[in-house]
Amino acid sequence: MASVQMTDVRKSFGAVDVIHGIDLMIEDGAFVALVGPSGCGKSTLLRMIAGLEETSGGEIAIGNRVVNDLTPRERNIAMVFQNYALYPHMTVAENMGFNLKLAKKPQAEIDARVSEAARMLGLTPLLDRRPSQLSGGQRQRVAMGRAVVRKPQVFLFDEPLSNLDAKLRVQMRSEIKGLHQKVRTTSIYVTHDQIEAMTLADHIVVMHGGRIEQQGHPMELYRRPANLFVAGFIGTPAMNFVDAVGGSDDRGPLAKLPGGEAIRVDGVRLDEGRPVTLGFRPEHLATHGAGARLKGPARFVEPTGALTHVTFDVGGHNIVAVIDGEHQVATGQAFEVSVAPELVHVFDRQSGMRLNAA
Amino acid sequence: MSGFARGKRRKFTSYVLTYAGLVSLFLVFVFPLLWIVGISLKTREQIFTNPPVFFWIPTFENYVHVLTQSDFLASFGNSLVVTTASVTLSLLIGIPASYTFARFHFPGRGVAMITLLIMRMLPPVAILLPLFVLFKAVGLSNTRISVIIAYTTFSLPLIVWVMKDYFANLPKELEEAAYIDGASRMLAFRRIVLPLARPGIVTAAILSLLLAWNDFIFAAILTNNATRTSPVLLASYAGGETGTNWGAITASGVLVVIPVIIFSLIVQKHLVQGLSSGTVK
Ligand SMILES: Nc1ncnc2c1ncn2[C@@H]1O[C@H](COP(=O)(O)OP(=O)(O)OP(=O)(O)O)[C@@H](O)[C@H]1O
Ligand SMILES: [Mg+2]
């Protein structure tokens, strides 16, 4: 196990800069998720840590040892690929033991470690099969087994669950979490699924265009997104955004919607007329309670069981609210919710940066 | 009811048609071979009987003749040597070359691939005469080495074009997984890439084997009586003072086909595809 430290890490493919200076400290034993939209450089960064991609600039250290010029073999990391990359001509046991075999460990030790990992992952009855004889979930588990067997310093995962169906994905997610709680190996997990990131990681790094937008504890990112990008990326359904202008009255700061409604905000000073963007999370819009009120006709009503998603129109903006499933709403009907001042996110409209204080 | 009956009849018809097709195909391909085997088992008189005899007591005198009275064994040995050597050499050079073409980007890659193809598209005679002059200049004329070099030159483009696609289609992640498992590039190539490319390698080997084993024109020009290969010897049975020796031609023809058949039987199980299915979704 080891920490991973990146200092001003850069990558370009020819003339194209893909990673623009990443600084990131990953504690020993942490589970870190790298999230971001497609093409933001998550896989590239992971592959640089693995040594599969050369580093164009900066420094990567694993356990205080700079690894920039080391081969993947010398880095002692394990990686789980999106398509699993199991060796088709080897059995499950051979796949899992390949690293130990290359390290010239005695066969008895290889067998012992493979069967231990197989037991941990429920693969014992499958050890003699070939990858082509396994289901998607089983292959996924073998790929994890191959990583676990070798007791590496760091686990790297590149969207390991994206080839599985929804149900299996949820199941494997908890298995990965359980596995990490057992072995406590530093893990870096790439995904574009923010739910996966939220549920698995104790530290999330949100990337966008080859830069880190924000990093921190999942709830920190959820509660205090640093900018519009993170605010829109973390949380489902996504945060609602409405343009407004700043102002205040004798009770404190306000933001005025184009339709004239005033929304009371908290933890921010707004000059009169300052252009801002307000953000409200759908789940923070309440059908009862105090706070500024938003109202308009309901456009879509989507029941999901316990919760219902209502899309309604506020001065030409579509706003989504997540409300209790028992609450009756009909399409076209007037709909009204309130939002507490401390749950209104205020962003500068130009820079997109968060304006609310802590 | 009628739907079921009609379905059954249609099935029967398609069954008959399928087999009729297969049988005629079989006859078209196998008939010449059977005819040759037939002639090789006849005496000189039986061969020239008109109308041909269809039932006779087979004789092995033609086989005895080619195996004892002629240069057959020497030429057969030459064929074995030049074929084995050129196939081995072609694979040894061709496999790493095609892997390089498949996995590395380097300036001139496309041009090099096209050049290989163009060389292969030239008629053999166009290359043959310059080769003949060249071998003479370096003192290799009438040697088996010259034939081996010529065959290798000629089968390399074939191998590279077949194998390059094969390597390019193997998921790169398999090799990357091997690097992460602690393999060097060389080791990953040996332990992961080569085993998975086996069907492709076998195909390439068959192609270059047939090229060398069946060649007549290169060997006819580049060898002498001591170094000639079987096809050249076979051709020498035709004409001559005693007339064409059909018995000897057909008997040696049959003997020459046997190694090819044995080889095909050995390698065909390696041709089974789909080995790489199930690695990558
Ligand atoms: N070998 C390469 N050559 C040139 N450009 C590349 C190469 N690999 C990746 N890129 C570019 O680098 C950028 C980042 O790619 P990367 O694969 O890291 O994205 P990602 O965040 O993993 O996306 P996804 O979620 O789709 O997997 C992309 O714009 C991609 O086109
Ligand atoms: Mg990716």
Image: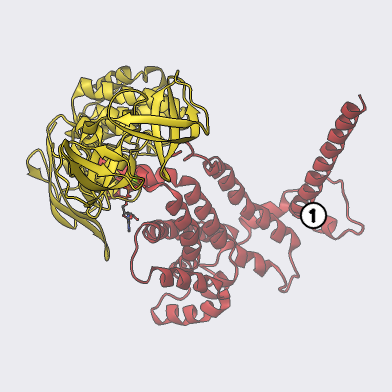
Chain colours: A yellow, B red
Instruction: Count neighbours of disc 1 (C-alpha within 10 A) and say few if under 14, some if 14 to 19, many if 20 or more.
Output: some
* Residue B95: image location, x then y, percent: 41, 56
For label 1, the residue is B43
Quadrant where the C terminus of chain A sits is: top left
Q: Residue at x 22, y 54 (%)?
A: A351
Which residue is farthest front? Answer: A250
Q: Nearer the viewer, residue A323 or A182?
A: A323
> Relative to B266, is A170 above or below?
above
Q: Residue A233's quadrant in the figure?
A: top left
The chain ID associated with circle 1 is B
The kind of secondary structure element at disc 1 is: loop
Q: Amino acid at mark 1?
A: Thr
Q: Residue at x 22, y 52 (%)?
A: A273
Question: Taking B202 as reference, is B224 above or below it?
Answer: below
Indicate the position of residue B217 as horizontal and vertical percent values: 59, 72
Q: Between A97 and A332, which is closer to the camera in this rendering?
A: A332
B197 displayed left or right of A193:
right
Q: Quadrant of the N terminus of chain A?
A: top left
Which residue is located at x 77 percent, y 49 percent? B25
**Residue A132 in picture, x, y percent from top left:** 47, 32
Any atom of ligand 1 within 8 Å of the CB at mark 1?
no
Above or below residue B230? Residue B28 is above
Question: For this rendering, which residue is in front, B96 or B77?
Answer: B96
Visible in this render: residue B7? yes
Q: Is residue A138 visible?
A: no
Q: Residue furthest left?
A: A64
